[in-house]
Image (cartoon, rainbow, N blue to C red):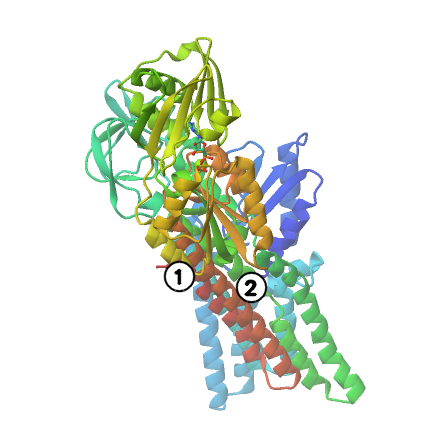
Amino acid sequence: MGGLNCANCASKIEDKVSKMNEIEEAHLNFIKSTLNIKVKEGYKEENVVSKVTKIVDKIEPGLDIVVKDENYSDNKDMDPNKYCSSSSCSAGDHDHNDSDGHNHEHGDSDLKILLIAISLYAVGLISNYFGAPKAIYLLLLGSAYIISGFDVIKSAVKNLINRNPLDENFLMTIATVGAIAIGQYPEAVGVMLFYGIGEYLESRAVNKSRKNIEELMNIKPDVANLIVDGEVKEVAPENIKIGDHIMIKVGEKVPLDGIIIKGESRFDTSAITGESVLKSISQGEEISSGVINKNAVVEVEVTKTFKDSTVSKILDMVENATSKKSETENFITVFARYYTPVVVALAIAVAILPPIFMQEPFSKWLYRGLVFLVVSCPCALVISIPLSYFSGIGVSSKNGILVKGSNYLEALKKVDTVVMDKTGTITKGVFDVTNIVLGKGIEEKDLLKYANIAESRSSHPIANSISNYCKDKVSMDSSKIDSYEEIASHGIKVGYEGKEILAGNARLMTANNIDFQEIQNSTTKVYIAVDKIFYGCIEISDQIKDGMRATIQQMKSVGINKIVMLTGDSDNVAREVSDEIGIDSYYAELLPNDKVDLIENIISEKKPDSKVAFIGDGINDAPVIARADVGISMGGVGSDAAIEASDVVFMTDEVSKIVPAVSIARLTGKIVWQNIIIAIGIKVLVLILSTVGLANMWAAIFADVGVTLIAVLNSLRVLRYK
Ligand code: ADP
Ligand code: MG
């Protein structure tokens, strides 16, 4: 046992290891009980790992360390599972640790020991009540004490040898031994017993939540059915190569990203997107790993290795999320560092000063001081707060919202301004050609030919739409393109067979001194010029995404008061879109730099302690995403640049995810604060009451393990979102 102090020592371990010369960074994930270290170049991993192991062992002896070499060759995962996660350490049944059975036994034996101790304790108290000889009473209570406190006392001794006197086991031992010394037998034994019971229950609760969180993120496929020469072979997804063909049977999880090459089926995408409606995907269409095949066998050609597939990316992101800590977590770390020494110092003062200066009886004040020691662990906060954030991140991911750190979850809570890109974010980014205007003496097929050539290499939604439209009408030879330049927020300049083709908005034409007629209406326009001669204009229009108006209403109802649209498109288009969906303000005809400047302005004007989120589709808005307080990209883990730059990723193309994202963040924040207030409040109350003689050891043990249990259970409420 003695897990609780681990919560405390966890931060000590992290601290110590980070300060090693050989270590670039170290993150201890208390919830997952792993220590992630990055070894600096030039150091030998084995040596560093054994050094780290020594540090860990010194701070918390008797630890089970499993060294795992995951993903990167310079990343070590240690699993201090068996000991270092609250009390659950000792009873931890962490999946990674293949010793499930063993751990269960361990948990059961803890329970058996506790039950024996409780029985002895109860019989002792009853026998005393009925006037049995004192010797029997003391023998029964004494054995209950030793049985329930054996592990605690053992750790206390070890920690003392390691000169770590502020260890919780040690303080608990002093408190109970002190109580025995002044003749408070039932309380001393009771405190040790309830400490054990509390730790046991906490370990159950923490493990349960770990399990729940793991289930939430149970998207990892077990096998891939590789098709070799018409036969199906079960292979680990890690061993599949790009271009391999795999079969997805009904009921199976798609193991890797790919394209369906045979068949069609409906897929449950809820684990990835949080959407419960089934999605039909047929031949030729892309399919993401992690979705579940619901009704027919399909064959998939793999387009990404397992490491680059959606599932791995999501898991990586969520698992690394805890290394970016929220301000509240940092506060708790600092708080924990000072809390114990301060309370211990107060305990000594309370026990010593009144007897010396006020001629008070020593035993009375010693008792009050001992009460202090019982509440001297900040464990309730150290365990429950990271757990709350991790739960929040888990629930978000279940809802198709990947949050890349606790700090972003904390920031989301405070979002009251949302800035959005227009094309691809508010609108579908799929343009229909609505009208074609030809330049003087130009034929439509020539206009389309050059438009098609110009747009062939761009990934902008406009380009995709025009290429689609032109596909069957004209042909081109892309090998004849001799230069290509995409001018952000203007359009495209292409050299083709010695000709210069320009395709873009009016700004592009003006900038190149093209003589053209500007058309005034609310369509998006792509003007085309070839060798400075105006060829015409393709008018296209985009559709607003379904339910945008309702989304804007919902955003307002969760307190997002300011909603702003940014676009590089014309003022006409911007006005029409913003009127239609009902947003407060827009800025049009922006260059990418203008967007960055604008977001900076908006951030500088925001209320203190509120946050500005930017939502974009990741196409040409990565700089703005990076600049916002909370940068959000949409549409899954497709575009690497956007994922890199963003703090939050919506797995679907829907802006509406901002509503659950903010709600989950608020729920998490609320629970975190409840825990802080409950834990600090009750502890301080007990300290005050004890000083004036109104709180006894029973109150103190409740303020310690009872409060921790309440805080942990309260954290679990995050998992019940929706
Ligand atoms: P948004 O802010 O709406 O996402 P962008 O900044 O991406 O828009 O683009 C602004 C404008 O630049 C577009 O409305 C269009 O007129 C022009 N443009 C950008 N890329 C292209 C392209 N590939 N082809 C034609 N025009 C383009
Ligand atoms: Mg855009």
Q: Quadrant of residue 307?
A: top left
Q: Residues within 10 Å of mark 2 (few under 14, many from 20)?
A: many
Say which residue appears at 53% left-offset and 36% top-offset. 592
Up/down of 579 relative to 681, above or below: above
Check disc 2 and report the residue beneath it: 381
Report the amino acid beneath label 2. Answer: Leu
Q: Looking at this view, is 54 or 535 the one in front?
A: 535
SS at circle 1? helix
Up/down of 434 relative to 601, above or below: above
SS at circle 2? helix
Q: Residue 383 at x, y = what percent?
A: 53, 60
Q: Residues within 10 Å of mark 1 (few under 14, many from 20)?
A: few
Q: Residue 168 at x, y = what percent?
A: 62, 64
Q: Is residue 7 visible?
A: no
Residue 519, label in figure? none
- In the image, 247: left or right of 429? left
Q: Residue 697 at x, y = what percent?
A: 58, 79
Q: Quadrant of the C terminus?
A: bottom left
Q: Quadrant of residue 48?
A: top right
Check disc 1 and report the residue beneath it: 557
Q: Quadrant of ligand 2?
A: top left
In terms of sequence position, does the residue under pointer 2 or pointer 1 come before the other? Answer: 2
- In the image, 295: left or right of 244? left
Q: Residue 526 at x, y = what percent?
A: 39, 28
- In the image, 476: left or right of 611? left
